[in-house]
Image (tube, helix red, strand yellow):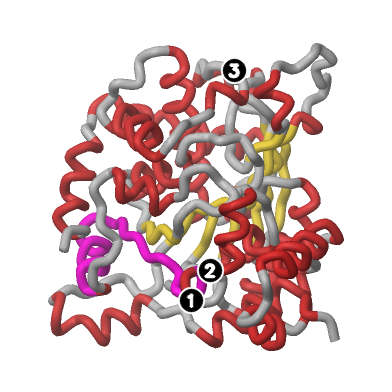
Amino acid sequence: MSLTNNPKEFFQWLETATEGTLFAFISEWHKKGESSEELISFIEFLREKAPPLSLSDLVYEKNAEIGVSLHADLAYDCAGTGGDKSNSFNISTGTAFLAAYAGLPVIKNGGRSASSKVGSVDVLYELGLDLDISEERKLEAFQKLDLSFFSSKVSSEYLLPVKNLARKYKESCFINLIAPFLSPIELQGQIIGIAQARWIPVIKEIARYFIQQGYRQKFILVHSSEEFLENPSQEPKDETELKSLVLDEFNTALPSKIIFISEYEQEFILNPASESFSELALTAARLKDLEGGNTEKNAQILLKIFTGEAKNSTLKIKAETLTLNTALMLLIKEDFSLFHDEKSLVKELTRNYVKLKKILETQNLYEFLGELRKYFTK
């Protein structure tokens, strides 16, 4: 039996594998293409090693200490596979803040960077949030502010050698595909950005499996690519554009495939730079407009958006992108059957976008960040 469908033997082998043999193995597996069956076996093995906790169980155990009661199991997450090599700023992290501020209960799962330049945890620490606090404090933050951050234990305890290799060589591998499904908290639903088109069928199958098993109720999947353009540009691309013509985020640079999965399933191709979204007067972006930088720069980008200082053209595009992704994430709490055609979907996205834009224009999310810091401090 191959190690790709026998996680128990894989992790036993991992204990003695050299860096060279491990890199060769994960590279060859990734080149061949990971199947949903293989990845599900790994996910189930890791769930058994570190079982995700339900909010209701946590509240029952911790209620005496924190003195709060939470809506059992009502939490959502936004994550991406990574691996699009776009070096974009931390869009999903910013989306978690804005969605929670708008009233969606969010528990964000994230980690240090692997194939990406700056991971969610990296930028959170730069924003002044210490994630090495107790579960009690994280739960209290969630109760008071509808937002908290938990990191998966399996990433640090079982997948660390693989993550270190991915980080060292900035290469994608099987952990890109399973990481979004390894939240340490059971969730109501997730929005997952997918970096590569060939991963879409695999992620869809895993999402369906999670719903069948009762691990989740809903998923929204997103993949952006030039291939969805009606008239792809034949003009030479600059160096930045040549790096990648895909994104695992909703944006105005490229059209996106949006997939809704619950008991109801529907797919759309949406282009926010098209006439369908004309009411929002969005700026057509280039991929390089969405680039971030190091941890400090990415934190500063989010702070400028949170404080309404995203005035120049590039920062304005970043703010629009973050708002678009949040508008999409807010749909996770809706009945997906309501989006029976593109017109109904665009109408709801537009409504959400207008509401969120007003929040960014009139509210100060820096104060919201300050409230979070009170909990995420030792």
Counting from the top left corner in percent of width and height, residue 71 is at 31, 71
Tag 3: residue type? Ala
Give the image quarter of residue 131. bottom left
Q: Magenta includes 140?
A: yes
- Alpha-carbon span between mark 1 and mark 3: 42 Å
In the displayed structure image, the side of residue 296 where residue 267 appears, left or right: right
Q: Pointer 3: what residue?
A: 284
Which residues, given as a range, are shown in magenta? 136-155
**At x 57% / y 53%, what residue is drawn?**
167
The tally of labels here is: 3
Nearer to us: label 1 or label 3: 1
**At x 69% / y 59%, what residue is drawn?**
173
Q: Pointer 1: what residue?
A: 157
Q: Main secondary structure of the magenta part?
A: helix
Q: Quadrant of the N terminus?
A: bottom right
Instruction: Give the structural element (helix, strand or loop) at label 1.
Output: helix
**At x 48% / y 31%, what residue is drawn?**
292
Tag 1: residue type? Glu
